[in-house]
Amino acid sequence: MGKMSVDLCGITLDNPIIPASGTFGYGLEFAELYDINILGTFSFKGTTKEPRFGNPTPRIAECASGMLNAVGLQNPGVEHVIKYELPALKKVFHKKVMANISGSCIEDYVYVSELLDREEQVGWLEINISCPNVKAGGMGFGTSCESAAVVTKAVKTVTKKPVIMKLSPNVTDIVSIAKACEDAGADGICAINTLLGMRIDLKTGKPIIANVTGGVSGPCVFPVALRAVYQISHTVKIPVIGCGGVSTAEDVLEMMYAGATAVQVGAANLVDPFACKKIIEELPEVMDRY
Amino acid sequence: MKDVMFTVDENVRIAENVYKMTLYGDTSDITRPGQFVNVKLDGLYLRRPVSVCDKTDEKLTLIYKIVGKGTERMAGMPAGTELSVLSGLGNGYDTGVSGDQPLLIGGGVGVPPLYLLAKKLTGEGKKVSAVLGFNKAGEVFYEKEFAALGCDVQVTTADGSYGKKGFVTDALPDGCTYYYACGPLPMLKAVFNSCKSDGQLSFEERMGCGFGACMGCSCKTVTGYKRICKDGPVLYKEEILWEK
């Protein structure tokens, strides 16, 4: 194992860097820019049972040191992903990929998990119970210990792959929800998804985002994410993936000091498509420095 | 797409709230008129997409209107400022289908990308007409530049203070083989409804990344979901669905 390698639920990553779901598509756009095999892995675009267009546009707004999105889980549906996206990915990515799964009811989560469990290239199932931009399901499952546990259990019954629950920060006590997921059999926790926010256009007096609200991400949420990772990792025994505003190798190290086993990089990929490549290149030196 | 450092060469006001910035840098990834670049500005998180007005091997021309913080910041940039630019984004216009008498229809800051297109089409020996629409006389730009390429140019202003009074659709010439349009959504809709010939229209949307990763700028088309930044910004007329 190399200096930067980590074990994530029994699978070795060459380094802890994982582009976060929704900022990396199914990998193909980035594979045109650099060899994505340098990544630890990546979490592919949140995938649902049926194809989804998502929300009307505008879906994007900016804020100080960050952005808001209300994409609303646009994706071609799990069957399309298995038939087209994964075979295309296999040609350019030779590692296990993290499958990000979303649903509007328990049956959907189970259906998608069951299908993706059969895919050899899928290493982990990352269950999104924290999307703030969809009307049915999404974050609804991640705001109580009971429902988070129900989804965790349901998915665990249909897969042997490690199940990572991606949690929402839009709750009173994220730690108890993480603990409930662990008790229900989760193999890992990813914290955090975006924070619910909004912006108003002063010229019109109306919300910029058509969906009115969106999820805030970028450097402005980093301290919130770091706090969540610290609290969760000091309570649960399963690995925690730190996610939220990570943009530099220093941020990665800070997340790992907080207790993260691996680190997801989200919004930074959108501003600098080479962000993950740069972080991976800089990480050894930064690790030596601190 | 390439991440290129560009250096501002000149940044001048050419009309009311409209600026022209020329920059030195590697333009090799800009392969078609109608493409855009995504500019990183200090202190602002998201990049700002700006259409390419003109380019040579080592020089890029952008024309932008001050509409918010980003463009305001750009307008204040002196020569020598260095900018990180994602270059060569979007599909751009397809000139192969233009026939021998293409028509260019631009509205406001939808005019700039049509300039490089005009250059390409006239370079291919085509007889190019251009209808350029603005709100008022003070906002008019690039009439002479299009004429200098050999285009037959008609300017319209909404208030009649310059050129023909009215909208671009009030000044469409007869006998064109194909059209290329860029401008605000109401203009594109009006052009779509008025022009009988086939054409390509360039769209605008708030973007996250500009290179197809985030799904922030998706739209529905006859041929499925498309990303304005990667599969567009140019759509063929027959692909367009106007439902929002």
Image (cartoon, rainbow, N blue to C red):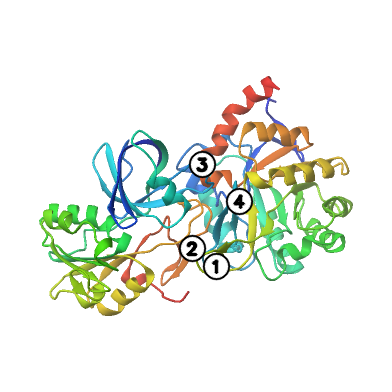
Task: Report the amino acid beneath label 1.
Answer: Phe
Residue B196, position in %: x, y?
23, 78
Q: Which numbered disc, 1 or 2, marks the residue closer to the eye?
A: 2
Residue highlighted by disc 1: A53
Chain letter for mark 3, please.
A
Instruction: Tell me the tag on residue B218.
Output: 2
Q: Residue sitting at 63 percent across and 61 percent down?
A: A198
Pointers 2 and 4 in contact (C-beta within 8 Å): no
A44 displayed left or right of A58:
right
Residue at mark 3 to residue at mark 2: CA–CA distance: 20 Å
Pointers 3 and 2 in contact (C-beta within 8 Å): no
Residue B58, picture quadrant: top left
Instruction: Tell me the tag on residue A272.
Output: 3
- Would you place residue A2 above or below residue A200 in this image? above
Secondary structure of residue under mark 4: loop
Task: Report the amino acid beneath label 2.
Answer: Ser
Residue B70, position in %: x, y?
45, 50
Residue B25, picture quadrant: top left
Instruction: Tell me the tag on residue A44.
Output: 4
Q: Which numbered disc, 3 or 1, marks the residue closer to the eye?
A: 3
Q: Residue sitting at 59 percent across and 47 percent down?
A: A267
Of label 4 and label 3, which has the lower sequence position? Answer: 4
Q: Nearer the viewer, residue A219 or A237?
A: A219
